[in-house]
Amino acid sequence: MSSDPAGVRASIRKYVMIGAALLMFTVITVAVNAVHLAVPLAITVALIIAIMKGSMVAAVFMHLSNEKKWIYGALLLTIGGFLVLLFVPLFTLMDTTGTHVPAIGGGAPPPGH
Amino acid sequence: MEKTATPGAHVHEHPHEHHEELGFWRKYVFSTDHKVIGIQYAITGLLFLLFGFGLMMMMRWQLAYPGKPIPLIGLWLGQSRAANGIMLPEFYNQLGAMHGTIMVFLGVVPLAVGGFGNFVMPLQIGAPDMAFPKINMMSYWVYFIGGVVMLASFFPTTGAAQSGWTSYAPLSIITSTSGQTYWLVGMIFLITSSLLGSINFITTIVQLRAKGLSYMRLPFFVWAQLVTSFLLLLAFPPLEAAGILQLMDKVAGTSFFLPSGLIISGKPLAVAGQGNPLLWQHLFWFLAHPEVYVLILPAMGIVAEIIANNTRKPLWGYKALVYSVVFLGFMSFIVWAHHMFMTGMGTTMSAFFQTTTMIISIPSVVILTALLLSLWGASIRFTTPMLFALAFLPMFGIGGLTGLPLGLAPSDIHLHDTYYVIGHFHYVVAPGTIFALFAGVYYWFPKATGRRMNDLLGKIHFWGSLVAINLVFAPMFIQGMAGMNRRMYDGGAMYQYNAPVLHWNVVQGYAAWTLGLFQLFFIVNFVMSIKWGKAVDKNPWEATTLEWSAPSPPGHGNFLTEPIVYRAPYEYSVPGAAKDFSPQFEPEKA
Amino acid sequence: MNIPYTVEERPDSGLANGKLGIWLFLASEVMLFGALFSTYIILRTGATEWPHGELSVPLGAINTVILISSSVTMVMAWASLKMHDWGKQRLYLILTFVLAGIFLVNKYFEYSDHLTRGEGPAHSTFLAIYFTLTGLHGLHIVGGMIVMAYLLGPGAKLWKHNPDQFTNRIEYTGLYWHFVDLVWIFLFPILYLL
């Protein structure tokens, strides 16, 4: 642990700067929202900004940028699990390959399907 | 660098602790000592196993003799459960759902992880206790409360949860019983307990290993517990979230899992709709698949320890075992939808899950093969724990192999939701895991109590159970392949195509009740040996791992002198050594 | 009996027990909120219609600012302790606690605004996931506040006889608090803006 006063004081400057950056990005997020973008683009931009903010909190406030191997390993595993949890059920539910998808309003499958 | 406290040294310098002698409640009930907590978990787990078994014995009556009054207890069950002693379908469903829930969440895992993990792991790594003793105590009591809630669910007149241990929506939500609500609340407690425990286990294994105990010198039991804890840590939270969502559907009128336009008994359900029943299935199985590895991994760990000890040679392929169990842990997170092949998923995702499921069978086979190869050229001692451990191998083999047609969608189409599935998973958990847990009890009982269990009673328990348990579960493959559905309260009698296989229900009934009788030998043995078993000293099995260097039973702080590890965990029959075992904790003779 | 590495770091892992413990806990929390985010995605992509403008963006944005500021004050509390400034630490910790309280007050206004109009979780799938996500997040805020109150109250005594262990506890509380902030950083755009 860096317990020398000079090192900690430098960290404090960093914390304040990152705090200001986070507030600025919040303003940007709200501002971008006012520009009504197409939904896929809006989602992409919002998530990019959120990921940037989140990374700053994690790397600086949570000192993740100089943490130990076990923490990184556990988190990597977790992020993997998180992504699987987020996307695989969606892919499974959206995957209609090989099945008949009825037209809007219903409709019988063609013969042989 | 600050002087680090060494385990055991503190006890050595201060033989009388700073704090006063603890009272009865702090010492035996609200204890923070991992050994006491482990025993609490083990006893509670064993009692729940017995209770869950009792539920099944009642089900087996209904399946063998549908519509006949249950002997002895039929009239005592009350009219809402068994009208005139004849089991009502609703009660059968309650028994089914609670049998599964209790066995998995209140019985096997608390015994395998909470019991064996808590008691043995810190001793095997040379630690004075767990990293977080107070959190350890909390995890037991939260489990206890969850168990009470689950048991309490039987008492309201509408009865316990009755939509399977899988609680699929919409049935679980629209069934108008409070039992399901109790189930959800109970699960939240159990999951919390599990999370507290897994944080403790991982931290303890990483941080409190004794000097000289590198990762590749860890007993395989510890590796198994480490991977198990990661599975619990990361896979349980989604079920906790799903439980909260289902609870809201039941209590707050939301429709996370209720689709639009659902009509029940002719009336449309008055909810906002737009929910997705499959969402529940995904969130449930995201946990429940890793959960089955939670069920089997500690068992494999126990079997490995006992095989090494009773073959008097090192385990074959230690590195392969370690890499396999870690790889298995990773893979277990991406196979879950093989429980959902019949939900209308498309061919791409179906192919994905079939592939991952086939891949995950590889590390399982490697582990089983390594344990089997460990027997080659061995000097086998057929002690009671070894009998159970040896039986585990073919039983788990059958269970595992019968899983393959279920993991491939084309064959699963025929076998899904039939008795074949029940046969498959019971083979892995019952003559698989539970036999391994019995092995562990016989093996570590002397360490925990300072006395051995009776060997003759143990062997009778073993042989009787082995025969009976196979007679219970083997016919299920026949019934399943004939198409007999699961969860039918009349035993399948209502369908013509089941007629040729119905008679197996009677066989299975008698086999189940016989199995119950043979457990009496275990119960009597266990209870009597606590007081009257033959006294033993530190290392009655002449084993090599660290727990055998502590007194039997170990005192507060576990070790009398700081444990130091000098070699690999299974150095049996080392050429040129004086004895046929070279314990990890004995220094090289100068 | 002494559990090693409660305060000092184990040489090979470089960690104290509590540091590993809190990160493992946070890993499980990622999966907990992950399941709810997954729920949101699945319900939204499967919905025929999804409401917009039902939530107050200004209120959400203010709450975001409040939570980010509380994260700054939290890390400042820890930094003050590393510089052995007990007074500053208490000030920053109290500030964090107060900011958290204001966040909850705002949430109370938001919730009652909807509930008095009959728009509870049962009203629509959107509100259902909104109340569940923010409700669970709010419970985590309450939990954090309880821990902070403990460290300001009875728990503060630890500073006298084991200052390093107390500093660690402030650090771990901070890690938890930053995580709570992190979840909100994603919740805000997802629920309020998109």
Image: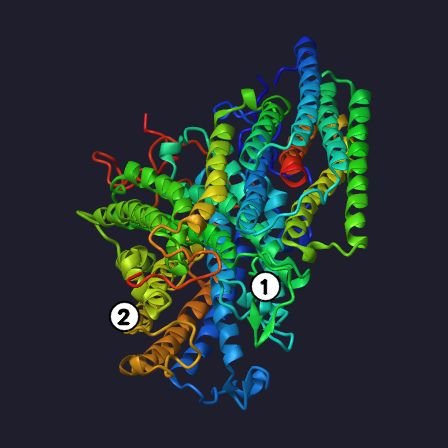
Image coordinates for residue B228, horizontal then vertical, percent = 44, 46
Image coordinates for residue B254, horizontal then vertical, percent = 65, 58
Name the residue rendered at 37%, 83% in the picture: B493
Residue nearer the viewer, B460 or B52 = B52
Image coordinates for residue C105, horizontal then vertical, percent = 81, 41
Using a 10 Å C-alpha cutoff, classify the residue at mark 1 as few (fewer than 14 neighbours), some (14 to 19) or many (20 or more). Answer: many
The N terminus of chain C sits in image quarter: top right
Residue C154 seen in the figure: no
**Can you tell which of label 1 and label 2 is closer to the viewer?**
2
Question: Callout 1: residue from which chain?
Answer: B
Q: Earlier in the sequence, mark 1 or mark 2?
A: 1
SS class, disc 1: helix
The residue to which callout 2 is attached is B481
Residue A43 seen in the figure: yes
SS class, disc 2: helix
The C terminus of chain C sits in image quarter: top right
For badge 1, the amino acid type reads Trp
Circles 1, 2 touching at the beta carbon (< 8 Å): no
For badge 2, the amino acid type reads Met
Using a 10 Å C-alpha cutoff, classify the residue at mark 2 as few (fewer than 14 neighbours), some (14 to 19) or many (20 or more). Answer: some
The quarter holding residue C134 reads top right
Residue nearer the viewer, B46 or B79 = B79
> In this rendering, is residue C49 above or below C96?
below
Q: Describe residue B51's horizontal placement relative to residue C151 as left or right.
A: left
Q: Which mark is residue B183?
A: 1
The quarter holding residue A49 reads top right
Q: Describe residue B243's horizontal placement relative to residue B351 as left or right.
A: right
Residue nearer the viewer, B490 or B582 = B490
Question: Callout 2: residue from which chain?
Answer: B
Query: Label 1 vs label 2: CA separation?
Result: 32 Å
